[in-house]
Image (cartoon, helix red, strand yellow):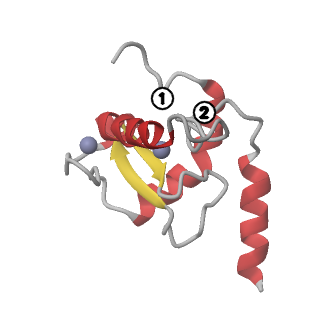
Amino acid sequence: MSSDYYGTSAAYARKEAGYREKALKIYPWVCGRCSREFVYSNLRELTVHHVDHDHTNNPEDGSNWELLCLFCHDHEHEKYTEAENGQSSLIRAGEDDHQAATFNPFADLKAMMEKGKK
Ligand SMILES: [Zn+2]
Ligand SMILES: [Zn+2]
């Protein structure tokens, strides 16, 4: 593990903020793979993984979220990359949580809030 692959990108931090906060409210601060426990001081090492690798799929009940520590999250994406290797050029590692995309979390939030009103 070299530099901070997950944490330093401002775009990632902005994009992540919306669902990360919700996921941290729903789930205990424990890594879903290695059961490492987290507290406020090291919470930035706990990341939100999308179970179906689709970061636009953020159901309010958190069913597509999984809290993983940096190491387990990295591992999860490695597995995914290996499985897809040579089969698809469309799906690459990091497509769900950490791609540099122009994603607006507030647009998503607004849609979800409107959904909730009905
Ligand atoms: Zn872990
Ligand atoms: Zn992920």
Residue 108 image point, x, y percent:
74, 57
Task: State the image quarter where residue 60 is shown.
Answer: bottom right
SS at badge 1: loop
Question: In this view of the protein, which residue sits in the foreground, 52 or 4?
Answer: 52
The three-letter amino acid code for the residue at tag 2 is Tyr
**Separation (CA) of disc 1 from disc 2:** 8 Å
How far across and down, in percent of the image, does residue 34 sit?
Answer: 20, 47
Q: Residue at x 48, y 29 (%)?
A: 6
Q: Give the image quarter of residue 19.
A: bottom right
Residue at left offset 80%, top offset 54%: 107
Look at the picture and state if 33 lies above or below 88. below
Q: Residue furthest bottom?
A: 118
Q: Which mark is residue 12?
A: 2
Residue 41 against residue 59 in the figure, above or below? above
- The residue lying toward the viewer, choosing from 101 and 107, is 101
Q: Decide: few, some or many residues near mark 1? Use Cα within 10 Å; few <14, some 14-19, many ≥20.
A: some
| Left or right of 58 on screen, residue 79 | left
Label number found at residue 6: 1
Proximity of marks 1 and 2: CB atoms separated by less than 8 Å: yes
Instruction: Tell me residue 29's x, y (percent).
Output: 30, 53
